[in-house]
Image (cartoon, rainbow, N blue to C red):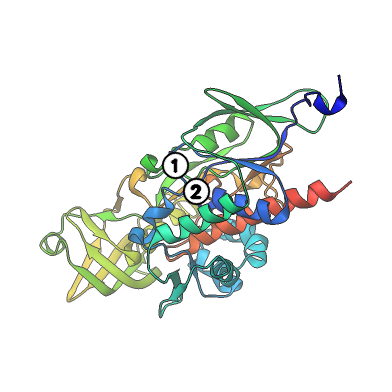
């Protein structure tokens, strides 16, 4: 038989990306740019389900600040220093302004708010998702949607292929796998914690989940009677037992039937969760929120459920991930990007930037590895 007509043996994929959200789409785009053949798996029927919800469907994808200011904002108030240190190299190599220019190069017109937040000019999250979709289509990147991954397996034996992506109907061997499955909040969008489960099964430690960037409950009648009202210039403070101000943030405060939400509340709540985890879990903190003519003190700090939170605090322990490559220190060829790891930032474009920057770092590392003899 002519050798040209012989069926070649199946070759492992260079890169399998699990998760078609912000980190996964960005990773696939970088892979196309760097010439790394990849395959993208998404458990839902379409890409970017959670991205479409970002900033109430407007998609605040970055903030016009320097990398150093970005890192300082993540750890503001003396929290999340480990997170800021871990992502520092990735953020410096893929800063917010570079991300903005990247979307502009794809034909996405952008809009800068007075506080530096960057949105697509039409304030539609679908514009960002469509930009990714168009790029991946033009680059002929294979995308498998409606395909939950069931397991990541290690393969014994020689050769470069060490891992396998297992789905209900088929399996794919890959030299490199990037877990970009997101956190464990908004499960209807596909963020169900499966990437963390895969990592744990392969020997990784998980930092327990906490809700991040979520409203806080109160039955205070001053809040309840104003349900539905929004106050743009609110102020939220976090106080210790001596009434010392540990953190404060000025921004939007929304009165809800359950209590309070809005940017000022979300960032205060994130600070509280990190403080309780990192400083002293027995500390009695309180919050003081000013909006309109009212000032409400919350002595009982009750966040809404994790499934409603904008981000998940917790996930794959970053101490087991190389910050210079985003590769696992435990499983060669396994990489991480975005919220699947224990990284998070305040509201205002920080978390999408973290997803994009860590995704770029991972794929750039894989591309460099592939070129190394």
Residue at left offset 34%, top offset 67%:
264
Q: Quadrant of residue 360?
A: bottom right
- Regarding residue 323, the answer to whether it shows in the image is no
As drawn, the residue found furthest toward the front would be 2
Sequence-wise first label, 2 or 1? 2
**Number of numbered callouts drawn:** 2
Q: Say left or right for 307 vs 253.
A: right
- Count neighbours of disc 1 (C-alpha within 10 A) and say few if under 14, some if 14 to 19, many if 20 or more: many
Q: Secondary structure at mark 2?
A: loop
Above or below, comparing residue 245 to residue 344 in the picture: below
Q: Quadrant of residue 348?
A: bottom left
Image coordinates of residue 105 in percent, x first then y, are: 58, 69
Disc number for residue 21 = 2
Image coordinates of residue 117 in percent, x first then y, are: 44, 72
Image coordinates of residue 196 in percent, x first then y, are: 54, 37
* Quadrant of the image containing the N terminus: top right
Q: CA distance from mark 2 to mark 1?
A: 9 Å
Residue at left offset 26%, top offset 57%:
299
Q: Secondary structure at mark 1?
A: loop
Image coordinates of residue 98 in percent, x first then y, are: 60, 70
Above or below, comparing residue 57 to residue 289 in the picture: above
Label 1 sits on residue: 191
Of the pair 246 and 121, the residue shown nearer to us: 121
Residue at left offset 41%, top offset 50%:
50
Of the pair 101 and 328, the residue shown nearer to us: 101
Confirm or deny contact between disc 2 and disc 1 (CB under 8 A).
yes
As drawn, the residue found furthest toward the right would be 373
Q: Say left or right for 245 vs 62.
A: left
As drawn, the residue found furthest toward the bottom would be 114
Of the pair 111 and 199, the residue shown nearer to us: 111
């Amino acid at each position: 038989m002519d050798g040209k007509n012989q069926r070649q043996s199946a070759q492992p994929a260079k890169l399998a990306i699990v998760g078609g959200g912000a980190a996964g789409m960005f990773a696939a785009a970088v892979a196309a740019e760097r010439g790394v053949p990849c395959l993208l798996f998404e458990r839902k029927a379409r890409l970017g389900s959670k991205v479409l919800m970002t900033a109430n469907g407007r998609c605040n994808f970055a903030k016009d600040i320097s990398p150093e200011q970005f890192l300082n904002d993540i750890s503001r108030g003396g929290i999340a220093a480990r997170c800021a240190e871990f992502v520092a190299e990735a953020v410096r190599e893929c800063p917010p302004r570079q991300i903005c220019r990247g979307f502009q190069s794809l034909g996405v017109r952008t809009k800068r708010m007075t506080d530096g937040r960057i949105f697509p000019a039409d304030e539609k999250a679908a514009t960002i998702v469509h930009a990714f979709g168009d790029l991946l289509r033009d680059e002929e990147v294979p995308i498998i949607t409606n395909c939950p991954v069931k397991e990541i397996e290690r393969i014994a034996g020689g050769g470069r292929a060490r891992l396998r992506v297992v789905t209900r109907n088929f399996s794919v061997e890959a030299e490199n796998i990037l877990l970009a499955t997101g956190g464990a909040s908004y499960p209807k969008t596909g963020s169900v914690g499966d990437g963390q489960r895969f990592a744990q099964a392969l020997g990784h430690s998980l930092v327990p989940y906490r809700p991040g960037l979520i409203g806080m409950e109160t039955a205070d009648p001053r809040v309840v009677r104003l349900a539905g009202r929004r106050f743009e210039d609110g102020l939220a403070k976090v106080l210790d037992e001596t009434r010392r101000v540990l953190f404060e943030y000025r921004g939007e405060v929304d009165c809800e039937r359950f209590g309070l939400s809005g940017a000022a509340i979300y960032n205060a709540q994130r600070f509280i969760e990190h403080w309780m985890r990192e400083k002293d879990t027995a500390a009695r903190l309180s919050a003081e929120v000013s909006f309109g003519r009212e000032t409400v003190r919350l002595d009982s700090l009750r966040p809404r459920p994790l499934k409603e939170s904008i981000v998940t605090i917790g996930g794959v322990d970053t101490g087991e991930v190389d910050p210079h490559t985003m590769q696992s220190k435990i499983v060669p060829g396994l990489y991480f990007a975005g919220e699947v790891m224990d990284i998070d930032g305040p509201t205002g474009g920080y978390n999408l930037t973290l997803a994009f920057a860590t995704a770029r770092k991972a794929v750039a590392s894989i591309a460099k590895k592939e070129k190394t003899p």
